[in-house]
Amino acid sequence: MQSSVIAEREYDELARIIESRSFRRDSLQLATARFPQIPEESLLSIYSQLVRLHTKRTYWQHNKLKTKLEYYQSYLVARETGTGTGDLLLQLAEKVCLSPALYGRIILEQYAESIAAATPPATVTASNACGTPTPSATTSTPPTTNATTSTPPTTNTTTSTLLTFTKSTAALATPTKVVTTPTTVSVSTLVNQWMKNPLSIPDTTLQLHIKTCIFKDTHYGPLADNIKRSVGYEYEFLLREKVQELAVPFLDEEGLRARGYDKTPDIKLEVPIAVDGHIVNWIESKASFGDRTCHEQYMEDQFWSYQNRFGSGLVIYWFGYVSELNSFQDQGILLTERFPDPQQITKLALRPLISTP
């Protein structure tokens, strides 16, 4: 029988299997063979979290200026020699064990910098939507390495180089369309725009490579972020449906914010229930696996705040959790991997108010 609640020793062994394969996708096959009792969606969630945790710990190594220049040079050489296809950036990212979307972002940053370096500051131009050049100036301050929402928070922050241009002066192929950017835009802003809309990248070959990185990356990039956000909304909707079936009055996050609360669980029950004898005043939905790192961060940032404001509550890790983490039930935080069954729930017997003459 499959179960998404696993012991910490099993989780540690699972993590070692994935790490031993350098976080490659084929490590999931080994993990599935070793732990057939763990549901596939739980394994995928664990795998994704391990990849993201590894990236946060090691991204600084890839974010050094010397390293980024080496990555860009490797890309240019591979393009020049004709090695690789539309999967070129995927292949290069796998060699250095980095997320394809993050690797692609590094290449875009260096591509934008090459445009600024190849164009004299006094003659760099910007285009409007019709392609008419508009003279403007730029600064020569160092480039920013600020990241998008997908990039780990360990990146350096430096002053941005301001770019304005219409046609390519870069080392890559001549673009086939006009760049429609604001008159003055930082490298970071420009790269963010390109990541969200690869078709706006002047170089058509680079367009293809970046699109492939975004579509194939299940952990980082705008597509991965949107999928993760959508899954979260889906399980929050499922939670609201389940609570509505209980016929218990409740407030959601929007209702709580309207009342001025800054810390808002997904569901605040107006009338508490009991789950397996534990009083539940609020319910939080997490569309992920609850490993120790994530859970401890959630405890610090969210769960203890909810407990202090609203009393004891319930956290649902829809993809399972490490069993040892469910150790704060007496302090008012209960973990589960699904919405409780009806036989687990005890509701207050509400009686209608009787008006007195």
Image: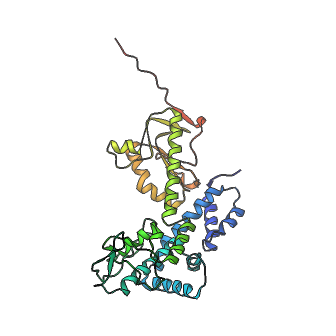
Instruction: Identify the residue at image location x=52%, y=77%.
Output: 205
The answer to whether residue 327 is left or right of residue 259 is right
Nearer to us in this view, 57 or 296: 57
Q: Is residue 159 above or below residue 3?
A: below
Can residue 118 be seen at all in this image of the molecule? yes
Expressed as whole percent of the image width and height from the top left, the position of residue 213 reads 54, 71
Colour scheme employed for the rendering of this structure: rainbow
Tell me, yes or no, if residue 163 can be seen here.
Answer: no
Compared to residue 288, the image places residue 108 above or below, namely: below
- Rendered image quadrant of residue 179: bottom left
Residue drawn at the location 54% of the way across and 75% of the way down: 209
Front residue (pair 28, 301): 28
Q: How many marks?
A: 0
Q: In the displayed structure, does residue 158 sit left or right of residue 72?
A: left
Q: Is residue 321 above or below residue 63?
A: above
Residue 333, given in percent of the width and then of the height, sits at 48, 47
Residue 147 image offset from top left, x and y in percent: 41, 70
Viewport quadrant of the C terminus? top left
Residue 239 coordinates in the image, percent (x, y): 52, 43
**Quadrant of residue 33 in the image?**
bottom right
